[in-house]
């Protein structure tokens, strides 16, 4: 019994027409009929009642059809699984991430993924969450690490929340601390010289909105920088900056946490709802989750006071 014979049989059973089945299978009708006859001889039973203009399954055909469909489905599944395993030896993953995550969380995840799948090319698109949502929606990324709740603007995307991260105030160790207290209030930022990211950064919008909610406009000494530039400006004593806890923990700067839980952000991994991520992207997502679980156990140095793994 050959797989192509079962495929021919199932197609004739579905169409109830030899000629139409041959057209669907892109084979000559006499060849299809010969293969069906060969299958019947091997099984020792007729599979079809053949009458002019009327093809019907025999009892033997009725018994074989669900088995043939299952065999063909299992074969297709096996083929797909083998192909996906082969894809993990080569191929690519397109990941979008915000600049702060590229400076903290992403490098460790990509190193871990590359150690496991060295043949996969990693393409990283760095940008703000709104830009990443647009790029992901357009099919130009496989996955994106974004800051919620921006996802509400893109109903075509699905996301899994990964991590809740506290924002902190970073200052130069060589400058006076921003407050004498252990924790700082948003109101304490009033009239304090601040270093601010360029427009389009999620952190800029978040910080500005928090200051306005407290009743004042933030005062910038330097603005317009990328993450590395902002860290350098703070280190040089040009001002303080509101940073994600994971970035600040690696910066060597003085860290002052905020009081309360208002100054925090939620990190999520997003993908399109209508297209399943390729196998390599799904494996990257798995590695991401495993890394977070490991980090939550304290093995990779994420500060437990500023990050919390979400269920």
Image: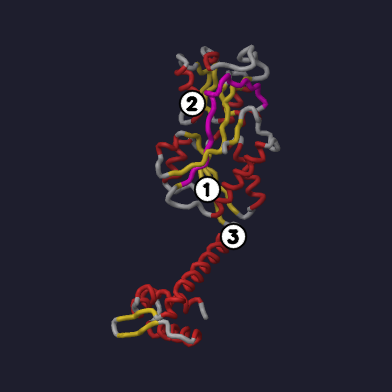
Q: Is residue 178 above or below residue 21?
A: above
| Residue sitting at x 65%, y 13% | 176
Residues rendered magenta in the picture: 252-271
Q: Nearer the viewer, residue 67 or 105?
A: 67
Image coordinates of residue 202 in percent, x first then y, are 49, 30
Whole-angstrom CA distance, mark 3 to mark 2, is 42 Å
Residue 259 magenta: yes
Q: Which residue is mark 2?
A: 206
Q: Which residue is mark 3?
A: 85
| Contact? badges 1 and 2 (CB < 8 Å) | no
Q: Is residue 90 above or below residue 237?
A: below
- What is the secondary structure assignment of the residue under circle 3? helix
Image coordinates of residue 47 in percent, x first then y, are 42, 82
Image coordinates of residue 250 in percent, x first then y, are 66, 30
Q: Which mark is residue 67?
A: none
Disc 3 crowd rating (10 Å Cα; few below 14, some 14-19, many 20+) is few
Q: Which residue is mark 1?
A: 94
| Residue sitting at x 31%, y 81% | 54
Disc 2 crowd rating (10 Å Cα; few below 14, some 14-19, many 20+) is some
Residue 14 magenta: no
Question: Of tags 1 and 3, which is closer to the observer?
Answer: 3
Image quarter of residue 301: top right
| Residue sitting at x 40%, y 84% | 33
- Please tell me which of labels 1 and 3 falls first in the chain: 3
| Residue sitting at x 56%, y 59% | 84
């Amino acid at each position: 019994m050959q797989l192509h014979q079962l495929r021919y049989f199932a197609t004739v059973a579905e169409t109830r027409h030899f000629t139409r089945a041959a057209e669907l299978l892109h084979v000559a009708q006499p060849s299809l009929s010969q293969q069906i006859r060969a299958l019947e001889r091997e099984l020792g039973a007729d599979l079809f009642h053949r009458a002019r203009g009327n093809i019907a399954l025999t009892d033997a055909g009725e018994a074989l059809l669900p088995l043939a469909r299952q065999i063909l489905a299992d074969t297709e599944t096996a083929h797909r699984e083998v192909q996906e395993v082969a894809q993990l030896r080569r191929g690519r993953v397109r990941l979008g991430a915000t600049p702060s995550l590229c400076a903290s969380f992403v490098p460790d995840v990509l190193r871990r993924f590359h150690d496991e799948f060295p043949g996969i090319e990693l393409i990283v698109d760095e940008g703000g969450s709104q830009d990443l949502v647009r790029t992901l929606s357009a099919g130009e990324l496989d996955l994106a690490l974004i800051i919620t709740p921006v996802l509400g603007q893109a109903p075509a995307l699905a996301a899994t929340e990964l991590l809740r991260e506290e924002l902190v105030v970073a200052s130069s160790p060589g400058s006076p601390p921003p407050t004498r207290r252990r924790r700082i209030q948003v109101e304490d930022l009033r009239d304090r010289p601040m270093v601010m990211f360029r427009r389009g950064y999620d952190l800029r919008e978040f910080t500005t909105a928090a200051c306005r909610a407290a009743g004042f406009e933030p005062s910038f000494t330097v603005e317009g920088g990328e993450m590395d530039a902002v860290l350098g400006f703070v280190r040089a004593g040009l001002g303080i900056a509101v940073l994600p806890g994971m970035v600040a923990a690696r910066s060597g700067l003085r860290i002052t946490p905020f009081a309360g839980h208002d100054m925090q952000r939620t990190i999520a991994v997003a993908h399109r709802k209508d297209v399943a991520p390729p196998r390599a992207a799904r494996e990257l997502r798995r590695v991401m989750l495993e890394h977070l679980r490991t980090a939550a156990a304290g093995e990779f140095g994420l500060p437990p006071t500023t990050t919390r793994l979400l269920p």
